[in-house]
Amino acid sequence: MFQRILIANRGEIALRVIRACKELGIESVGVYSEEDSQAIYLRFADETLCIGPSGTSRPYLDIPTLIAAAEIANVDAIHPGYGFLAENAHFAEICQSCNLKFIGPTPETIGLLGNKAKAREVVQKVGVPVVPGSSGLVADEEKAISIAGELGFPVLIKASAGGGGRGMRIAHNEEDLRSTFQAAKSEAQAAFKNGDLYVEKLIERPRHVEIQILGDRQGNVVFLGERDCSLQRRHQKLVEESPSPAVDPDLRRRMGEAAVRIAKAVGYEGAGTVEFLLAPNGDFYFIEVNARIQVEHPVTEEVTNLDLIKEQIRVAAGEALSFTQEDVKIEGHAIECRINAEDPEKNFSPSPGKIELIVPPGGRGVRWDSHTYTGYRIPSTFDSLVGKLIVKGRTREEALALGRRALDEFVIEGIQTTIPLHRKIFEHTDFVRGIFDTGFIDRYFSSEA
């Protein structure tokens, strides 16, 4: 097992990894920009190192500085968290060359899965359905129009190296496609330094369902049920739950087995997520693999009673998975609300600033994963996540009741948050009935969205 781990991240996920390290008896090293000097996670790390100035996210993306910090702190491994460099194959390769274990898949696996066009090829070879689309990258508008004509409108233009909705556009007709193709290309180039695009048929009214996987170096891969992440605004998730109201045991098994086939085909090591679109008729299609821990991993932890961060660390240290697929049991129902410092009444405009008072809800079945506290200042430099509210009940109905109670209890003063929107969602008849898709937020909360 590792002796010391550096967390190349900040905020909520840094604190989450530090807690896992403490429980495993591993020393943790936290890094921070000057802007994060008062961050709560720094109080609990065994050592902390400043890696850069305020006003920019660059320190957490500065590979030479992070490697230097790891060498100064004499660590065995680096945990990248999510975001920043978590899916950067070059960073994983540099770690490897410096005899630092990157807690995640190999550089080769990250590179392969990070290229959506290549990932589709792998997936098709193992017999997993993909959304009908271009066989490779699409160089220009005319080629895109030709492919769209074969597929039939509407289509989705997607960045090959993309994520989080960036470099993604919907085209309902040829005019749409012409006006959005270059915009998608420019956005992808700016966000990922890669403007490559491909075109997919748009599956209408789908659910976004993802399968959590874990793999070890011995070739074992298991799936830990699914998460329904359909409630999104501009491809950014707002609410996630497990299990999905739309997935029965047979569909869960088939989707899980498909995810395992993909993982085994690329020699996957560590925690990862295979994302699918689930059509209204029950057909599912591969979207992508997130080769890292997900923001929404707590809902899977709650229904499986497994600590995914600890499992990540154990596997990275060379240990085999301590359980088999038959050992995995899904019990109860968990729902997560991402509480962001944004104003839903003003088109989700960011609301950075000082938290004058925060009193999270508590009680049985309520979990609050956050790095914030009364007096903490939400910076404008980074994402607006305040924390993740997770509730777990024996049934979905009980989880919804817990969620409503917890959201009503929640007190945050000094900044605007998405809590009012989450309260509305939990009261909406269709959400309560489990009838929703990726267009739910736009359809019913368009004034907020």
Image: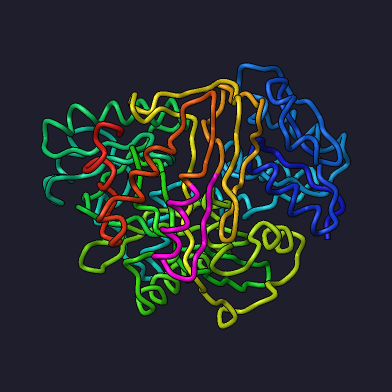
Question: Where 172 falls versus 278 (above or below)?
Answer: above
Quadrant into which the N terminus falls: bottom right
**Quarter assignment of residue 444:** top left
Is residue 403 within the magenta segment? Answer: yes
Q: Is residue 73 left or right of residue 190?
A: right
Q: Residue at x 51, y 57 (%)?
A: 391
Question: Where 8 falls versus 402 (above or below)?
Answer: above
Q: Residue at x 20, y 45 (%)?
A: 155
Q: Is residue 14 visible?
A: yes
Q: How many marks?
A: 0
Q: Is residue 227 left or right of residue 328?
A: left
Quadrant into which the C terminus falls: top left
Q: Residue at x 59, y 48 (%)?
A: 368
Residue 45: give x, y in percent of width and height. Answer: 81, 41
Between 424 and 295, the one nearer to me in the picture: 424
Is residue 430 within the magenta segment? Answer: no
Q: Is residue 82 left or right of residue 350?
A: right
What kind of colouring is applied to the model shown? rainbow
Question: Where 83 falls versus 231 (above or below)?
Answer: above
Q: Which residues are magenta?
A: 388-406
Residue 19: give x, y in percent of width and height. Answer: 74, 50
Q: Residue at x 73, y 38 (%)?
A: 41
Between 117 and 398, the one nearer to me in the picture: 398
